[in-house]
Image: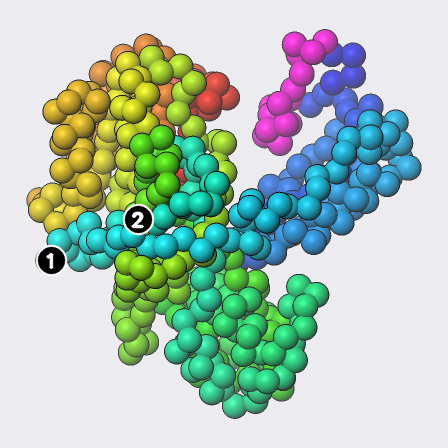
């Protein structure tokens, strides 16, 4: 607030939560909101910050900009506009005096300029009889100059499956050779569907846009009921939509404008650069199911399932500075994950072993079956035997009549877990964002409340303090 000394500075998230209401008349701001329009609350956090800062008296430099997954052009324009703002002239000079980044060197690989990595191995992690197909894929980074840290992710930039593209182009009224414009570039519809546009699972936002563009009365009725809309979109993809509801009145250009740009798929890196400097490993859960009378596979994971050694995959490293091992190798570490959420912990343990970290390591791992789905079992047990892995607690949900999940193991071991927290342990959570991560967070809150003898509000504040201190980090998807 005005006149507050530095030690009383207010974190932005506390402003958003309404926990403090200082006067911000001295503050100038602009909001660039990043989001994904496939989600119901698109750019919601950016909108909330924008509205809250204005309500507290801050001066808006320019209207809020909301970016979808293809954000680069809009974000660049927003930054240029801020630099040129007369209102911010007092600060602009200092910013403008800083050198702008040069063009990306050819050897720095990004989503726009990926590295062609040779596939060294593609092995199943689940065994025959499993209800899942999880793969361990090793890629060569030789001569790339690529370096990564434990906690980073590997981005894969793959075209859409050719058979699905051809099936879409069989839709009456869609001319494969018609010119369409996507993100300022003009290209043929066939190329756009193959390489630039998202053609996978339906989102409720796409169904609504499609209904409006085609005037389809049935789809409009479905779109008016959120519950019915969610049921309709579940298990369907773009091909299902156009077959059941042909794009009447839409030409190729109009059809392309409804689709959002394709995004690279990010996979948590499952290896340590120190241990395998010329390789990167990932853990891939292959999406496979049947719906609407068709067998389905994930747009990207389905292709990865069949890639053979000697083939190539276009990749780049996505930095994740918010999911990092502690700088002090003596710090204890608690790792909580389910399914392919084990991937970054394989990297963590390999890294900690390689650098000779003396801090204790405790893993909570969950999956469906001990016999079929104990991912990286041999390596984990070897680390347990060598004491790199101090403790391991597992939960296999389908090995007994009553399902057991990692959050139950957390509560069972609550006293010891609280002791580790008191000893300064860092806690990591990796896995499903919709159910696993919230359930684990509630279990952590329960452990803190019970074993720390705290009231519910104080337990929540304790967990927030861990997060502020970067002792509680999440990589969820």
Residue identified by numbered label 1 = 128
In primary-sequence order, the first of circles 1 and 2 is: 1
Where disc 2 sits, the SS reads strand
Asked if the stretch drawn in magenta spans residue 329, the answer is: no
Residue identified by numbered label 2 = 138
Q: Which residues are magenta?
A: 5-20
Q: Is residue 315 left or right of residue 370?
A: right
Between 175 and 413, which is closer to the camera in this rendering?
175
Question: Neighbour class for label 2 at 10 Å: few (<14), some, many (≥20)?
Answer: many
Q: Mark 1 and mark 2: span between their CA atoms?
A: 21 Å
Give residue 75's position: percent from left, percent from top.
Answer: 69, 48
Give residue 272's position: percent from left, percent from top.
Answer: 34, 34
Q: Is residue 103 left or right of residue 152?
A: right
Q: Is residue 419 visible?
A: yes
Between 326 and 279, which is closer to the camera in this rendering?
279
The correct choice, above or below, for 169 with respect to 322 in the image is below
């Amino acid at each position: 607030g005005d006149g507050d000394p530095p030690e009383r500075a207010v974190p932005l998230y506390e402003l958003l939560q309404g926990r403090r209401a200082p006067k911000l008349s001295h503050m100038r701001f602009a909001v660039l909101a990043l989001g994904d329009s496939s989600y119901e609350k698109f750019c919601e956090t950016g909108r909330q910050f924008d509205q809250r800062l204005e309500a507290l008296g801050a001066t808006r430099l320019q209207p809020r900009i909301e970016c979808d997954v293809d954000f680069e052009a809009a974000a660049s324009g927003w930054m240029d506009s801020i630099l040129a703002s007369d209102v911010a002239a007092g600060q602009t000079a200092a910013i403008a005096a800083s050198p702008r980044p040069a063009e990306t060197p050819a050897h720095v690989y990004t989503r726009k300029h990926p590295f062609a990595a040779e596939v060294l191995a593609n092995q199943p992690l689940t065994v025959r009889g499993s209800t899942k197909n999880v793969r361990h894929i090793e890629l060569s980074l030789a001569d790339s100059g690529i370096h990564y840290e434990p906690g980073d992710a590997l981005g894969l930039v793959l075209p859409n499956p050719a058979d699905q593209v051809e099936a879409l182009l069989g839709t009456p009224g869609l001319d494969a050779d018609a010119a369409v414009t996507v993100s300022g570039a003009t290209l043929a519809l066939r190329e756009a569907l193959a390489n630039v546009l998202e053609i996978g699972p339906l989102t409720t936002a796409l169904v609504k846009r499609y209904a409006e563009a085609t005037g389809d009365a049935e789809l409009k009725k479905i779109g008016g009921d959120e519950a019915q809309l969610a049921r309709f979109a579940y298990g369907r993809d773009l091909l299902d939509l156009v077959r059941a509801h042909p794009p009447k009145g839409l030409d190729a250009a109009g059809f392309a404008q409804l689709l959002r740009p394709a995004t690279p798929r990010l996979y948590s890196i499952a290896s340590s650069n120190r241990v395998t400097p010329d390789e990167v490993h990932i853990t891939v859960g292959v999406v496979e199911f049947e719906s609407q009378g068709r067998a389905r596979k994930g747009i990207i994971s389905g292709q990865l399932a069949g890639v053979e050694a000697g083939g190539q995959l276009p990749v780049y490293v996505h930095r994740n500075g918010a999911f990092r091992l502690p700088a002090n190798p003596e710090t204890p570490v608690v790792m909580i994950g389910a399914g392919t959420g084990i991937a970054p912990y394989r990297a963590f343990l390999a890294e900690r072993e390689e650098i000779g970290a003396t801090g204790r390591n405790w893993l909570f791992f969950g999956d469906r079956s001990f016999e079929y789905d104990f991912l990286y079992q041999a390596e984990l047990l070897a680390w347990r035997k060598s004491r790199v892995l101090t403790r391991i607690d597992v939960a296999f949900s389908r090995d007994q009549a009553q399902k057991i999940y990692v959050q139950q193991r957390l509560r069972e071991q609550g006293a010891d877990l609280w002791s580790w927290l008191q000893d300064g342990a860092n806690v990591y959570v990796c896995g499903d964002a919709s159910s696993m991560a919230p359930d684990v967070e509630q279990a952590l809150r329960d452990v803190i409340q019970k074993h720390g003898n705290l009231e519910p509000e104080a337990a929540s504040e304790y967990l927030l303090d861990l997060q502020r201190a970067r002792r509680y980090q999440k990589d969820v998807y």
